[in-house]
Amino acid sequence: MGPRIRLRTRLWLGGLAAGGVAVAHILAFLLAAPDPFRREELLKTTGHGGWPLLVTVAMGALVVALAGFAVGRLRDPRQVGPAPFYLGTARRLVIMQVVGFLLLEAGERLATGKGLAGLSALPLESLIAIGLVAQVLVALAGAMLLALLDRVVDGLVRLFRQTARAPRSLVPRGVSDIQVPLVRIASGPANLRGPPRRT
């Protein structure tokens, strides 16, 4: 992928990043607060009231992104080495997910009603540090998943191209002129005349 990317590529990258932000966000909260009761309290105090809806939308975007990537890859079987593809995707995902995570957390802190005081305390929270590390790790894993999906789709394309296809007509040319007689099983008279009319 070059420096300028197409809209279709931006869409599946965005969907993958959205899913990555949600997965890493959940992972960060699991690591920051392993106790479920403490985690529930932490989610409430940090403005995660609409979190179930956000996760649902992000996971839907992730599924659509992976499907869109696979379909686009089937239509455009370009030859790109695995290393450039992985590195370019990983770099973009890390940037998108880190920025997305910080914007999400800032928006959630503003939703709690704490205002600028909540935003100023954001860099000091251990949850943010854990979340940033989780975002980077999940972005790298997402790029690896995409590189793997890329190889699977490439393999399928090669397999379908190598598989011999059935001929359009199963009868060889010149043989189709032969007329095969049809066998009739008749009951009653063998002519086409109907029964006599009664008057």
Image: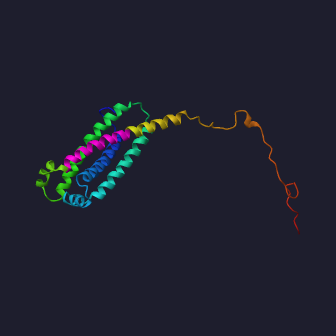
Give the x, y percent position of residue 137: 28, 42
- Relative height, residue 37 to residue 168 (above, below): below
Quadrant where the N terminus sits is top left
Which image quadrant for residue 74?
A: top left
Q: Quadrant of residue 40?
A: bottom left
Q: Which residues are magenta?
A: 127-146
Q: Is residue 78 left or right of residue 198?
A: left
Residue at the spot x=38%, y=32% of the render? 82
Q: Going by the picture, which residue comes out furthest to the bottom?
A: 199
Q: Is residue 150 left or right of residue 54?
A: right
Model colouring: rainbow
- Return the x and y of residue 42 as percentages of the image width and height: 21, 58
Name the residue: 26% across, 45% down. Answer: 134
Residue at 52% x, 35% y: name it: 159
Nearer to the camera, 149 or 76: 149
122 or 189: which is nearer to us? 122
Q: Quadrant of residue 4?
A: top left
Q: Please count the marks in the image.
A: 0
Most prominent secondary structure in the magenta stretch?
helix
Question: Residue at the spot x=54%, y=33% of the render?
Answer: 162
Can you say which quadrant of the picture contains the C terminus? bottom right
**Most extreme residue toward the front, as rendered?**
35
Quick check: is 101 in the magenta stretch?
no
Q: Is residue 195 found left or right of 90 in the rendered image?
A: right
Magenta run includes residue 143? yes
